[in-house]
Image (cartoon, rainbow, N blue to C red):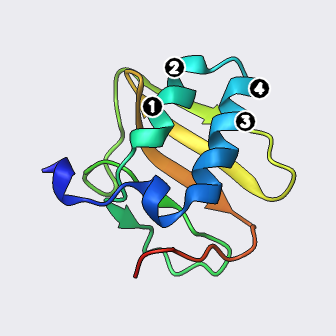
């Protein structure tokens, strides 16, 4: 269950603050509210040194999200941030080419 996963905001508060601001700037007000409550289900395991992406919901790897899916590209000052959203739910936070994030929680 999701409540068993930590919140991303507890591990990476600066990321969530940045995402909230960027989403508001893009007019994505509902997602700006939702992003505060996404869970850290898993870090991406692609082993690419430039990737720090976060799975925020359980999803079978290699399967498309299907109906209701949309990508929300954001405009950070550095790197790339893109959200995969399905019917208003943030499923994945793609984080590329950015300074290493350091979790507040082990």
Q: Quadrant of residue 67?
A: top left
When the figure is inspected, residue 103 is found, relative to residue 31, above or below; the finding is: below
Q: Secondary structure at mark 3?
A: helix
Pointer 1 with pointer 2, Cβ within 8 A: yes
Pointer 3 with pointer 2, Cβ within 8 A: no
Q: Position of residue 53 (x, y in %)?
A: 53, 62
When the figure is inspected, residue 56 is found, relative to residue 24, above or below; the finding is: below
In this rendered view, identify the residue nearer to me: 15 or 45.
Answer: 15
Residue wearing tag 2: 30
When the figure is inspected, residue 60 is found, relative to residue 42, above or below; the finding is: above
Residue wearing tag 4: 25
How far apart are the two marked residues, 3 and 4, measured between alpha carbons? 5 Å
Q: Secondary structure at mark 1?
A: helix
How far apart are the two marked residues, 3 and 2, measured between alpha carbons? 12 Å
Q: Position of residue 83 (x, y in %)?
A: 55, 41
Residue wearing tag 1: 34
Q: Residue 22's mark?
A: 3
Q: Residue 6's mark?
A: none
Pointer 3 with pointer 4, Cβ within 8 A: yes
């Amino acid at each position: 269950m999701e409540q068993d996963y930590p919140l991303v905001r507890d591990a990476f508060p600066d990321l969530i603050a940045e995402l909230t601001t960027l989403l508001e700037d893009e007019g994505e007000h509902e997602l700006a509210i939702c992003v505060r409550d996404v869970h850290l289900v898993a870090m991406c395991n692609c082993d690419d040194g430039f990737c720090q992406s976060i799975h925020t919901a359980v999803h079978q790897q290699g399967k498309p999200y299907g109906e209701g899916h949309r990508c929300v590209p954001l405009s950070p000052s550095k790197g790339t941030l893109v959200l995969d959203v399905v019917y208003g739910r943030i499923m994945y936070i793609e984080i590329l080419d950015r300074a290493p994030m350091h979790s507040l929680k082990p």
